[in-house]
Amino acid sequence: MSLNLPRIIGNAVSVANSWLDRRALHHPRYFKTLASLGALWFASHLVQATSHLIAPHVLPSRLGKLKRNAGAWAIVTGASDGIGKGFAFELAAQGFNVVLIARNRAKLESVAAELRGEFPQAQTKIWVADAAEVTAEGRVDFAQLKKLVAGTPVTILINNVGIANNPLELDILPDKDIVDVVVVNDIFTTLITKHVLPTLEANGPGLILNVGAFADRLAIPYMGVYSGSKGYTTSWTRGLAAELRERKSKVQVQALLVNAVNSQSNHTPVGLITPSARSFARSALRLASTQVVIAPTFWHKISSGILLVLPECFSRPMVSAFANQMRENFRQGKKLGQS
Ligand SMILES: NC(=O)c1ccc[n+]([C@@H]2O[C@H](COP(=O)([O-])OP(=O)(O)OC[C@H]3O[C@@H](n4cnc5c(N)ncnc54)[C@H](OP(=O)(O)O)[C@@H]3O)[C@@H](O)[C@H]2O)c1
């Protein structure tokens, strides 16, 4: 039996209308109270939505506070490509020195040289680590990272590294893919934060940016493992933010809701809704410390916001079309956005 949704909604609206009509005819004051409550509800939501949308973009950036005059350092995970590389360059543009973390030393060294070429005043350090190995005994040693940054005023940690599962049915998705997504996106990120937090506290004020994804809000077929791992990012960030407030910490934490960004893993051409990695990082840094969970680009907020407020009967076909396109690309060995 199929549900005739428009008819059900139509019937419900006409029943409510006739009930209100009868009440309004006999009890005009009752109707007025109801109308005022409705107007109040609408106005408060409008103010909330507008302030969420606009306020962060008009408030002055709080990044300057983290610079400690000169010589402050930022740690960026997944820094040799995509959004992480974008953050490294934009942080250097703002006067920060950068610790670059990823798996491939040669690539990291080439990014460090490129960065110093563009910003000769910037210093760089490299830490080679495979986030997927963090649970394997002795493979990722945070003591090495602590030693690397000992004595340097680190005030920012950008938890950017993240991977997605291949868009396959759960029962044929290799166990290793599932484990890697959760370990890289959630476990590594939590552990590096735990180990860097005392340094950030000592050098406070400090900032932790956790790169999440709008995928955590959407039901994307075949991407549940990735979406779930990014759901952890926002929930954990909220919990940590509350904990840091409770502890009166000088460190703030923020989760970034990301939609499409042109990167190594997403080849969607740069456009209105798809920023370059550097422009995305620039917006995120401008809005640092404004809201605990934030979509740092205006068009991400609008495009994803529309998907989220649309009734599921409209949004579901769009999300399914996206998922099927991703599966087709995967079958053909292409990246997202590659034609
Ligand atoms: N781009 C988008 O459209 C988009 C949308 C939503 C959310 N995001 C999120 O944004 C973040 C960055 O994505 P991106 O698209 O910029 O990625 P990307 O272009 O694929 O770059 C990934 C970076 O992470 C490093 N990396 C990958 N696996 C690693 C591991 N196991 N250990 C250490 N480093 C590793 C890579 O270097 P090596 O391979 O050399 O290690 C590279 O520097 C992720 O958290 C992603 O979920 C991106």
Image: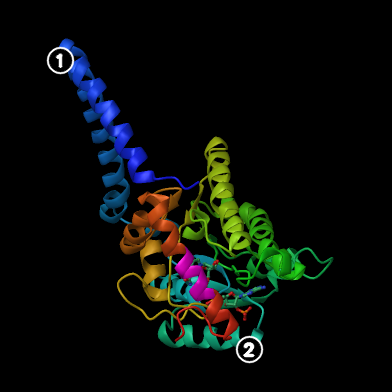
- Whether residue 84 is visible, yes or no, is no
Horizontal arrangement in the rendering, residue 27 relative to residue 321 (left or right)? left
Q: Which residue is located at x 38 percent, y 56 percent?
A: 314
Q: Secondary structure at mark 1?
A: helix
Residue 106 - label: 2
Label 1 lies in ligand 1 vicinity (Cβ under 8 Å): no
Label 2 lies in ligand 1 vicinity (Cβ under 8 Å): no
Badge 1 crowding class, 10 Å Cα cut-off, few under 14, some 14 to 19, many 20 or more, is: few
The secondary structure that dominates the magenta segment is helix
Towards the viewer: 226 or 323? 323
Residue kind at label 1, given as amino acid type: Leu
Towards the viewer: 183 or 125? 183
Instruction: Determine if the magenta segment contains residue 227.
Output: no
- Labels 1, 2: front one: 1
Give the image location of residue 188, x and y in percent: 68, 62
Specify the quadrant of the image occupied by residue 303.
bottom left
Towards the viewer: 25 or 152? 25
* Separation of marks 1 and 2 at Cα, in angstroms: 78 Å
Towards the viewer: 17 or 64? 17
Residue kind at label 2, given as amino acid type: Ala
Horizontal arrangement in the rendering, residue 269 relative to residue 160 (left or right)? left
Q: Secondary structure at mark 2?
A: helix
Horizontal arrangement in the rendering, residue 181 relative to residue 320 (left or right)? right
Residue 25 - label: 1
- Whether residue 232 is visible, yes or no, is yes
Give the image location of residue 254, x and y in percent: 48, 52
Specify the quadrant of the image occupied by residue 78.
bottom right
In the displayed structure, 201 sits above or below 304; it is above
Give the image location of residue 21, x and y in percent: 19, 21
**Which span of residues is magenta-colored?**
320-326
Horizontal arrangement in the rendering, residue 218 relative to residue 139 (left or right)? left
